[in-house]
Amino acid sequence: MQIVLFEPEIPPNTGNVARLCAAAGTPLHLIEPLGFKLENRYLRRAGLDYWPHVRLKVWPCWQAFAAEGRQGGRLVFTSARDAATSTPLQHFAFAPEDCLVFGPETRGLPPEILVLSPHRVRIPMREDGVRSLNLSTSVGIVLYAALARTGLLEAWG
């Protein structure tokens, strides 16, 4: 399992995702351009002292990641703006080598990226006017659901 943040914009969200990836032993890929510098204090504070435990790779563009970073895993896209063509989280058949891809907070994944894979998942939500969840919350929900559904959590106890 790998986490991919495509052009993330908000430093604390990325810091929280980095801490999550450290806890789950999951590689984190950041696709540039980033909406912040990696030295950003809010990014560092959100990641606390877990940064040495994060398997982080920053890619200059999507094409570079697709050519070298993917390592054969399926691209599984998530997007609040793509609910009509995505599978509810609880019904999606995750695989251990999946690359879980999340778009930028304000724009979501662009159409030119979404067409690259038929694998799409969404977090079901009640329809009470909430458009989307926070990026780091969404990554946590999807990652742990994927780890559970593939049996990868079992080794942790």
Image (tube, helix red, strand yellow):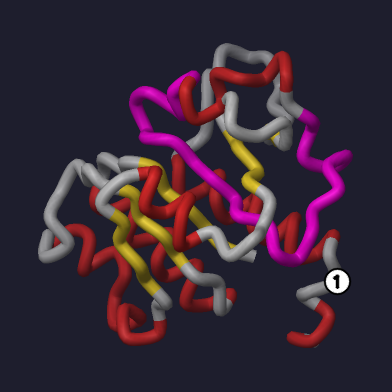
Image quadrant where residue 81 sits:
top right
In percent of the image, x 58 and y 75: which residue is there? 24
Report x, y in % for residue 114: 56, 27
In percent of the image, x 31 and y 79: which residue is there? 51
Q: Is residue 149 above or below residue 119?
A: below
In percent of the image, x 69 and y 27: which residue is there? 125
Task: Please tell me how crowded label 1 is: few (under 14), some (14-19), or many (20+) other residues with Cα within 10 Å.
Answer: few
Q: Which residues are magenta?
A: 87-111
Report x, y in % for residue 18: 40, 66
Q: Quadrant of the N terminus?
A: bottom right
Image quadrant where residue 57 sits:
bottom left
Mark 1 = which residue? Answer: 151
Image quadrant where residue 108 sits:
top left
Asked whether, in this view, residue 131 is left or right of residue 142, the answer is left
Report x, y in % for residue 58: 30, 61
Report x, y in % for residue 146: 74, 57
SS at circle 1: loop
Amino acid tagged 1 = Gly
